[in-house]
Image (cartoon, grey):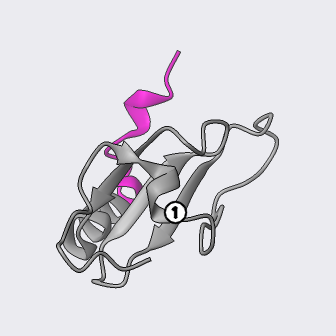
Amino acid sequence: MTFADGSVYNGMPASDLGEQGWECPWSGPNGGQCVETKQLADGRVALRQSTDPTGPALIYTPEEISAFVQGIKKGLADHLTAR
C-alpha cells in the first residue's frame, strides 16, 4: 500500500498497511507468537505481532533493521532471553 502523503508512522494500526505482503521470517515452536515483517514501498520495514494483526506497527528504516540484525548476530540482545 502506498501513501502519497507520507502518512506511514510508528504505532499506526498494522491493518492500515493492508494484509498483503506480511511475512513471518522467524517461526518455530513458539506457540504462534511471531513477529511479522512487511517491506514498504519506500524501503522501510514494518513489524507487527502475528497474534494482533490489527494492532500497532513499528516502522524502521533499512539502516535501523540492519543495525538490529547485526546486534542480534553479535549477541547484544542475549540478555533479553535470559531467565
In x, y percent, where is residue 58? 34, 50
What residue do we see at 49% from left, 23% from top? 82
Q: Is residue 81 magenta?
A: yes
Q: Quadrant of residue 24?
A: bottom right
Relative side of 82 to 43, left or right: right
| Above or below, comparing residue 23 to residue 41 in the picture | above
What residue do we see at 42% from left, 37% from top? 78
Q: Which residues are magenta?
A: 72-83
| Above or below, comparing residue 37 to residue 43 in the picture | above
Where does the N terminus fall, quadrant-wise? bottom left
Q: How many marks?
A: 1
What residue do we see at 17% from left, 73% from top? 5
Q: Quadrant of residue 45?
A: bottom left
Judging depth in this view, the residue of 47 and 64 nearest the camera is: 47
In x, y percent, where is residue 40? 39, 77
Q: Quadrant of residue 62?
A: bottom left
Please give the residue where the numbered disc 1 appears in the rendered image: 37
Identity of the amino acid at label 1?
Answer: Thr
What residue do we see at 78% from left, 49% from top? 28
Relative side of 27 to 13, left or right: right
